[in-house]
Image (cartoon, rainbow, N blue to C red):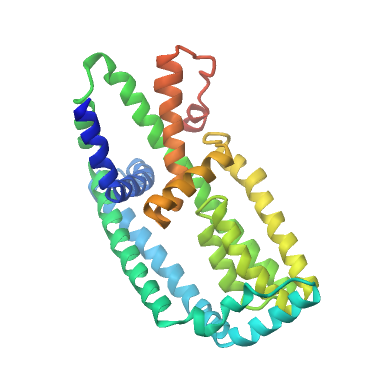
Amino acid sequence: MIGVAVLLLLAWQSIYALLTVFAGAVVGVALRGLTEPVVRWTRLPAGVALALVVLLSLGTVAGVVAGLAPAVASQGRSLMKELPSIVDQLQASLGRLGVSWTLVRELEPSRVLSPEVLFGLFSSAAGVLTAGFVTLVIGVYLAAEPGLYTRGLLRLVPLQRRKRVAQVLDRLERTLRWWLVGQCMSMAILGVLTTFGLWLFGVPYPLLFGVITALMTFVPILGPILAGIPTIAVALTVGPLTGMYVAVFYVGLQSLEGYFLTPMIHRKVISLPPVLILAVQMILFAIVGVIGIVLAMPIVACVMVLVQMLYVQDGLGDRMEQDDPLEEVAE
């Protein structure tokens, strides 16, 4: 009992490091998922194929950033330059709607761009870059030799349980893999639709807000809401009617993502209760900050797999839901 308490205490004290390792495992699953077809198609050694995948992935990201960065940066500079007038226009639009602009005053440039805020943003960016590098390194190591770590973990399990634990690990890997596929496709589709829709509505900086929406879509539930707030605020400066149109447009996009894109891509593989995801996001945010919000959904998905397979099926003997949609996807 004391040993368990000590382990729980150590886990609590090192929760940020554990979440970083988990994020590395997610990256490793993604790299492994890209490496396996390359090995099948090219017959290259796994290590060479992984190196090729890493280089191509980094090159693709660099190419996309290089292609979008000039336009996004230009729109971002324009937005910051026009921020005072945007705040004034937003106040006027909200005033015509009978809404108090007390909260809008918090967006004054002197507060938004204060030295304390800028220092906090710089520190956060440095921390994100460091964590991202460590996560990538862990992911590459895990993808390079997944059998080494799997065998080591299985050796800690009694012989009669190793086959079942291996099945659980395989299910966890495939769940994370299809979650990543769904999130990346949703990000790309919503980013393009948002950019095109805002351009049609005549909202300034459509590419900037499209990129923000795409990135924030990676975070379920909260991400799209946080992306929509500044977009709708800027749309209101064009006119109250435009702001209402954009708000309806955003609601429609999120309905498209929640009720069509995600179920179609995931095929109900990781269908999770939104309230549960939101609760875990809030808990992890209170404990570790933003990284908790980002990793909430994959964590919940993995916990649901463990509960279903180890507790419901093995512990309770309830095998009514033996059909595994992941098996259909794998075939």
Figure disc tally: 0
Residue 52 in sight here: yes
Relative to residue 278, is residue 24 drawn left or right? left
Q: Is residue 315 above or below residue 237?
A: above
At x 26%, y 57%, the residue is 134
Say which quarter of the image contains residue 63: bottom left
Say which quarter of the image contains residue 94: bottom right
Counting from the top left corner in percent of width and height, residue 121 is at 40, 72
Quadrant location of the N terminus in the rendered image? top left
Counting from the top left corner in percent of width and height, residue 26 is at 36, 46
Residue 147 in sight here: no
At x 38%, y 43%, the residue is 33
Relative to residue 59, is residue 206 drawn left or right? right
Relative to residue 103, is residue 16 drawn left or right? left
At x 80%, y 77%, the residue is 96
Between 139 and 45, the one lying in front of the other is: 139
Residue at the top extreme of this rendering? 317
Counting from the top left corner in percent of width and height, residue 24 is at 31, 49
Counting from the top left corner in percent of width and height, residue 197 is at 70, 66
